[in-house]
Image (cartoon, rainbow, N blue to C red):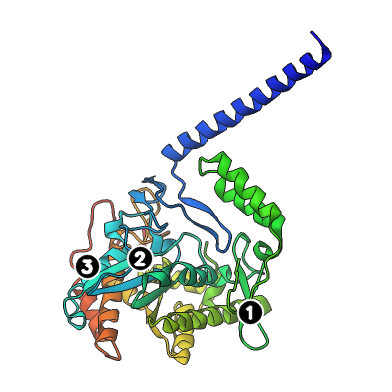
């Protein structure tokens, strides 16, 4: 056998080995995605997004069959063009809005859609709620989602679900540990200036792409996206086309340092920009501040111990600050935590936690989603009627929530949390 033949044979064996290894990896990825579904993909502008047509059974917290529709958001498929006689609401938010812990029909967005169908101000119009929530998103990613995806569906109302538990940190390039997301800073003129390694580094974008696409079961697409990133130049954002590429107890206190002060400032500017974007496209913005588990713990003694230990003077501090900023900007706002606390305490029921996770912690269970959805529906119905103070309507809605007990959701103890 000649030298050339031997070299060609060895090269063929090496190539065959590589191909076999890639095939094994491909099969392994598909098996992993079947048993441990992964719903995300890399997104050049937002860092990550939901993968269209992904589906699977999620049971790490709660239990639900999860399906991402063909357009890449949770819920039924919706036509891009709004049907005549339809009132559309676009939801922006993070994992509380995506809500893969419960079946879609139990999410607060689905509850909102059903409840608003009976709102007299809508005069029998069909209500559609489109859920653009994505796990881990901060306000910057939600603003980009509004610009690049949600606004194309012509919503009449945009609901920004703000979770102070981590959204303020998510909005800070200094405080946030997961940098595979776009950031902004506030410029000298008050405008938003895109920043962060996702925007400024091709190698970092390559790492983020690998991180999110390595579980998508498509090795050819992985290499294709890597080649596209390496060939692309650095992107320069413009005003017309801006290419904006776990809880922290500090939220319960005034900002302790410059980094937290800047995070609050950026957050305020982002909410303002979201309101401007919605208004530009003839939609009305409602900001809803969500709760944390301790804020709505059913036993007041447990809450009191927590506030003493953490030296917290006002457990609703972050909610009140966001609400004050919204009112200053003329943006409608609803603070859920006080009403949810009242409901949880009076009914002795946990709104967070599941049968397979500790009660009182983590995401909303079915009761939390139901009560929140009904409160948000009451607020929106009052807004649509042109009403001002909707507290009475929300209190009535909360009182009509009915029996709190549901299978798999434990009642809270009526004594000291034991």
Question: Which residue is at the far top?
Answer: 1
Q: Residue 219, percent across and down?
A: 57, 39
Mark 1 or mark 2, earlier in chain: 2
Q: Are marks 1 and 3 in contact (CB under 8 Å)?
A: no
Q: Which residue is under mark 2?
A: 80
| Identity of the residue drawn at 66% across and 78% down | 257
Q: Which residue is under mark 3?
A: 114
Please tell me whether mark 2 sits on a helix, a strand or a loop.
loop
| Identity of the residue drawn at 70% across and 54% down | 231
**Is 223 on the left or on the right of 38, as rendered?**
right
Q: Tell me the quadrant of the picture where the C terminus can be found.
A: bottom left
Mark 1 to mark 3: distance in Å?
39 Å
Residue 262: mark in rendering: 1
| Identity of the residue drawn at 30% across and 72% down | 88
Please tell me whether mark 3 sits on a helix, a strand or a loop.
helix
- The reply to whether residue 184 is visible in this rendering is yes
Q: Residue 204, percent across and down?
A: 69, 56
């Amino acid at each position: 056998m000649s030298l050339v033949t031997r070299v060609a044979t060895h090269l063929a064996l090496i190539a065959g080995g590589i191909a076999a290894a890639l095939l094994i990896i491909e099969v392994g990825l598909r098996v992993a995605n079947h048993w441990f579904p992964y719903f995300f993909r890399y997104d050049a502008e937002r860092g990550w997004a939901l993968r269209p047509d992904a589906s699977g059974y999620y049971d790490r917290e709660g239990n639900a069959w999860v399906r991402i529709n063909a357009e890449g958001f949770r819920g039924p498929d919706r036509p891009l063009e709004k049907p005549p006689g339809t009132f559309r609401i676009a939801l922006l938010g993070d994992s509380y809005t995506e809500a893969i812990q419960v079946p879609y029909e139990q999410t607060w967005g689905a509850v909102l859609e059903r409840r608003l169908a009976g709102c007299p101000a809508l005069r029998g119009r069909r209500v559609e709620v489109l859920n653009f929530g994505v796990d881990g998103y901060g306000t910057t990613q939600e603003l980009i989602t509004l610009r690049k995806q949600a606004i194309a569906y012509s919503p009449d109302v945009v609901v920004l679900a703000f979770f102070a538990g981590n959204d303020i940190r998510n909005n800070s390039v200094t405080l946030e540990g997961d940098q595979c997301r776009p950031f902004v800073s506030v410029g000298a003129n008050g405008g938003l200036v895109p920043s962060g390694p996702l925007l400024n580094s091709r190698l970092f974008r390559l790492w983020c792409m690998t991180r999110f696409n390595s579980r998508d079961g498509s090795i050819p697409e992985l290499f294709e996206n890597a080649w596209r990133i390496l060939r692309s130049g650095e992107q320069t954002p413009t005003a017309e086309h801006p290419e904006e590429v776990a809880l922290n107890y500090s939220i319960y206190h005034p900002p302790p340092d410059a980094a937290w002060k800047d995070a609050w400032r950026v957050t305020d500017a982002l909410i303002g920009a979201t309101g401007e974007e919605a208004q530009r496209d003839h939609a009305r913005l409602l900001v809803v501040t969500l709760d944390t588990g301790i804020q709505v713990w059913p036993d007041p003694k447990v809450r009191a111990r927590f506030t003493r230990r953490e030296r917290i003077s006002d457990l609703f501090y972050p909610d009140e600050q966001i609400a004050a900023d919204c009112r200053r900007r003329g943006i409608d706002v609803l603070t859920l935590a006080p009403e949810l606390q009242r409901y949880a305490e009076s009914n002795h029921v946990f709104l967070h936690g599941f049968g397979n996770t500790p009660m009182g912690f983590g995401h909303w269970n079915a009761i939390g989603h139901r009560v929140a959805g009904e409160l948000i529906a009451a607020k929106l119905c009052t807004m649509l009627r042109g009403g001002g103070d909707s507290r009475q309507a929300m209190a009535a809605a909360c009182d009509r929530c009915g029996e709190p007990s549901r299978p798999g959701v434990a009642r809270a103890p009526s004594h000291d949390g034991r």
